[in-house]
């Protein structure tokens, strides 16, 4: 139990410690305003990272999500500009498309026994290309319904809980239930623990793989909707590299990159930690924003070392009982 | 009979894994399935659990013919299996492992409380009351994991339980705990198939024994009616009177290599060994007794951590890696040629040229014409069929694959060649040819260490036979002493006797 939960505790401890450092330097950072903005600014990342967590728990990877988010933004913007469809209808159409796209990648991964890395890399180029096919310009979104989606709930202390911030929290909750409280979630962890064993225990590998990538595609689509609300436009060059940021958030959140162990809640903390670093740099004002990347790089390294250390501990124990 | 198998046959490209095997199992008995590597035990189990489709024969459970197509189907029919390693998922909790696929669900969500209750019920009666079902399985010792796997298999299937080397990574006390569980299940009327290469455990636990050898059924008998020596006779075989021992051939050439106290902790106890020019040293022993480990140490696959290997003039031979061993003029044809010996997708020519090219280094490529000439030469000399140097090795029969492995080493012209089970899984004709080849090579001055689980082969080919038991060289036989009875006795002698070892 301890070894499984340790990375999660480490994540939470690092987040709290970082927040404490920020608070000591800038007391204003401990306010619902900052917290509310943290949720809003990182909503799209948090949502896509939930999907990525499930994929990584199964031992896979999904490189297509950044492009899918960009595709989603462009898809929504162009459809709202050129057709009379209601945004909700466009959302439904989009989510169906991205979910089917994810399912197709899952099907290829299983059917061709190809590494997820390659299949989703192809998906990444495909989705980016599709976004360019729709438009090469930034298309503004101008719709009454969108104004409504940008509304928020005042929090005590003056902070704002936006619709997209709340959507992120709900996505995390849904992800937690899916990954830790359903048979499907157990099957995902089983797959991450070892596909041959999972098969022996009766997991339908093909069905599970398709569902995992379909879920990731759905979350990427949802993240695209949230991103379009956040930016108010669709742009084919947006969110380049977001898939890597999401992977970083998942790993900093304490999920084992090789699969089989981790918590969706940790991913939320990972996303917030990354957002916190950015906020600190904004507060400081004199630091280059590239420091964000450096700190994230160091955090990633720290967690990789932590995971390796835990693995070696586990192996040591196995060796002792084997002799 | 609970389970009846008749005329079971299964072939793979290059090997006949099972050849008309029969087996039966009564309710309430523990039936040992014995044999060396490649005897067909695993193939039999895989046919039974639906992982392989059989080529011929009948399997009947409770008198009804069955043909399971998957592990799940076999489980549903009542046949559950616990393997040595891959069984359960250490990253899931004990309860999740036990109830996997059948977790109690409420409103689409798993009810942990009911799942834990069910798991505790499944574990009742296995003496695992101290186990917290909410903890992850990997936190418990292998023995507990093994018993949890048994509990799951019994709960899911409940008629036939197959235990495939369940004690391989357990210590003596854990093994006894496991045996108590198995005896309890036998009393409940399950039929249990027990696979192990620990003969003590077989005599301790089982009611009947079936021995397979080279894919064929050798004997089925009550365990109580057998003694150790007979059993080893059955496993290693002695009925093939195919060859005379190499008596009369004088092999007292000059010493070429001398191992002094060579060994590696946990793998093989330190041993002394003198290798003479042009002799065949046979290495006899049961599976896991230290045969392969000796070869590994002599070739630097697992470098020795004590002792030294010296040239006749006293200089030490560095054996830190296979690369160093090759540089010293050693060769090694490993036991599992499919994974360690050949590159199945490359052609015969490319396989033969591999080691030679490795020695020349990448900067001096072997000219294609020369490689082809070399390949054609060995194809002719070793009679490799089909005689096509461009054919992928994976498409050849087992015997011919083995010849390609040999050809590869012969192209290097080594002075000391280690052959681990060179005739495993190949037909009788090719078998004799390879032994003839061993003779030819030593006549030309090469020394060979022959590791084999077939006594006939050792007797036919060896000038000396070293017997290993419990990872220790226990006996050396020469001349008239190289016969089945003496070897089997040396293997079976339960207590190491340093005086007798010098027989």
Image (spheres, grey):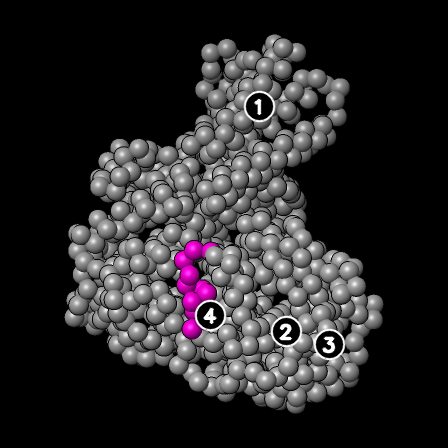
The disc, 4 or 2, on the residue closer to the chain's N-terminal end is: 2
Mark in front: 3 vs 1:
3
Task: Please check the rendered image and state whether residue B450 is part of the magenta-colored stretch, yes or no.
Answer: no
Residue in the image at 43% along x and 55% along y: B495
Report in which chain the residue with disc 2 lies.
Answer: B
Q: Earlier in the sequence, mark 3 or mark 2?
A: 3
Q: Secondary structure at mark 3?
A: loop
B406 with respect to B492 (left or right): right
Q: CA distance from mark 3 to mark 1?
A: 62 Å
Which image quadrant is residue B53 in? Answer: bottom left
Disc 3 or disc 2, which is closer to the eye? 2
The local crowd at label 1, few if under 14, some if 14 to 19, many if 20 or more residues have their Cα within 10 Å, is: some
**What residue sits 30% from the left and 33% below the top?**
B130
Viewer-nearest residue: A124 or B3 = B3
Pick the front one: B49 or A313: A313
The answer to whether any part of residue B464 appears in the image is yes
Q: Quadrant of residue B75?
A: bottom left
Q: Are marks 4 and 2 on the same chain?
A: yes
Tell me the tag on residue B448.
Answer: 2
Q: Which residue is mark 4?
A: B487
Q: Main secondary structure of the magenta part?
A: helix
Q: Position of residue A144 (x, y in %)?
A: 49, 32
**A184 shown above or below B443:** above
Residue linked to disc 3: B413
Asked if the residue under mark 2 is in contact with the one under mark 3, i.e. CB atoms within 8 Å, the reply is no
Dot 3: few (<14), some (14–19), or many (≥20) neighbours within 10 Å?
some
Residue B495 is one of the magenta-drawn residues: yes
Q: Position of residue A7 (x, y in %)?
A: 52, 31
């Amino acid at each position: 139990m301890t070894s499984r939960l340790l990375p999660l505790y480490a994540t939470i401890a690092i987040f709290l410690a970082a927040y404490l450092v920020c608070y000591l330097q800038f007391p204003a950072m401990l306010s619902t305003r900052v917290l509310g903005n943290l949720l809003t600014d990182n909503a799209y990342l948090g949502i896509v990272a939930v999907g990525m967590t499930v994929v990584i728990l199964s031992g896979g990877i999904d490189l297509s999500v950044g492009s899918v988010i960009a595709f989603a933004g462009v898809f929504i913007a162009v459809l709202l500009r050129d057709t009379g469809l209601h945004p909700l209808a466009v959302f439904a159409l989009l989510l169906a498309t991205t979910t089917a796209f994810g399912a197709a990648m899952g099907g290829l991964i299983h059917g061709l026994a190809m590494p997820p890395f390659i299949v989703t890399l192809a998906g990444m180029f495909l989705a980016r290309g599709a976004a360019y096919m729709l438009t090469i310009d930034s298309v503004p979104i101008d719709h009454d319904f969108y104004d409504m989606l940008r509304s928020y709930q005042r929090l005590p202390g003056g902070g704002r809980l936006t619709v997209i911030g709340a959507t992120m929290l709900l996505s995390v909750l849904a992800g937690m239930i899916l990954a830790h409280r359903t048979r499907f979630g157990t099957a995902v962890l089983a797959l991450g623990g070892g596909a041959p064993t999972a098969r022996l225990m009766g997991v339908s590998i093909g069905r599970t793989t398709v569902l995992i990538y379909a879920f990731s595609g759905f979350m990427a689509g949802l993240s695209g909707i949230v991103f379009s609300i956040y930016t108010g436009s669709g742009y084919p060059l947006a969110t380049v590299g977001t898939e890597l940021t999401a992977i970083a958030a998942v790993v900093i959140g304490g999920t084992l990159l090789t699969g089989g162990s981790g918590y969706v809640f940790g991913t939320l903390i990972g996303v917030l930690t990354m957002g916190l670093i950015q906020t600190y740099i904004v507060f400081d004002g004199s630091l280059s924003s590239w420091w964000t990347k450096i700190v994230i790089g160091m955090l990633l390294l720290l967690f990789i070392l932590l995971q390796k250390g835990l693995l070696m501990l586990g192996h040591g124990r196995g060796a002792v009982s084997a002799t | 009979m609970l389970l009846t198998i008749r005329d079971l046959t299964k072939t793979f490209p290059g090997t006949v894994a099972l050849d008309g095997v029969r087996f039966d199992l009564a309710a309430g008995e523990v039936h040992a399935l014995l044999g060396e590597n490649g005897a067909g035990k695993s193939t039999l189990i895989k046919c039974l659990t639906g992982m392989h489709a059989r080529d011929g024969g009948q399997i009947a459970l409770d008198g009804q013919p069955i043909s399971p197509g998957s592990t799940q189907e076999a489980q549903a029919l009542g046949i559950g299996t616990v393997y040595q390693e891959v069984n359960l998922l250490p990253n899931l909790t004990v309860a999740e492992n036990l109830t996997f696929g059948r977790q109690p669900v409420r409103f689409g969500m798993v009810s942990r409380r009911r799942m834990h209750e069910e798991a505790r019920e499944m574990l009742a009666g296995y003496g695992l009351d101290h186990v917290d079902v909410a903890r992850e399985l990997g936190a418990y010792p292998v023995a507990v994991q093994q018993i949890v796997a048994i509990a799951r298999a019994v709960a899911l299937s409940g008629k036939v339980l197959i235990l495939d080397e369940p004690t391989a990574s357990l210590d003596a006390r854990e093994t006894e705990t496991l045996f108590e569980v198995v005896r309890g299940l036998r009393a409940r009327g399950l039929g249990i198939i027990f696979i192990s290469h620990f003969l003590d455990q077989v005599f301790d636990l089982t009611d009947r024994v079936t021995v397979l050898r080279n894919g064929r059924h050798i004997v089925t008998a009550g365990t109580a009616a057998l003694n150790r020596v007979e059993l080893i006779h059955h496993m290693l075989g002695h009925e093939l009177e195919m060859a005379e021992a190499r008596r009369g051939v004088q092999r007292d050439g000059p010493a070429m290599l001398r191992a002094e106290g060579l060994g590696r902790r946990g793998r093989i106890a330190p041993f002394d060994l003198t290798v003479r020019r042009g002799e065949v040293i046979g290495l006899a022993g049961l599976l896991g007794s230290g045969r392969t480990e000796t070869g590994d140490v002599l070739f630097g696959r697992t470098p020795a951590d004590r002792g030294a290997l010296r040239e006749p003039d006293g200089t030490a031979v560095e054996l830190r890696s296979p690369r160093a061993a090759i540089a010293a003029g050693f060769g090694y044809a490993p036991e599992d040629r499919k994974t360690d010996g050949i590159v199945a997708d490359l052609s015969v020519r490319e396989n033969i040229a591999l080691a030679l090219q490795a020695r020349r280094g990448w900067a001096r490529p072997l000219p294609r014409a020369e490689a082809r000439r070399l390949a054609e030469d060995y194809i002719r000399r070793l009679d490799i069929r089909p005689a096509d140097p461009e054919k992928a090795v994976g498409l050849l029969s087992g015997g011919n694959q083995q010849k390609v492995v040999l050809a590869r080493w012969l192209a290097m012209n080594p002075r000391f060649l280690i052959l681990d089970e060179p005739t495993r899984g190949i037909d009788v004709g090719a078998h004799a040819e390879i032994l003839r080849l061993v003779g030819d090579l030593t006549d030309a001055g090469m020394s060979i260490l022959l590791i084999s689980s077939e006594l006939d082969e050792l007797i036919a080919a060896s000038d000396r036979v070293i017997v290993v038991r419990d990872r220790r060289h226990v006996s050396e036989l020469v001349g008239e002493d190289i016969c089945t009875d003496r070897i089997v006795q040396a293997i079976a002698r339960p207590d190491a006797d340093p005086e007798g070892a010098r027989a």
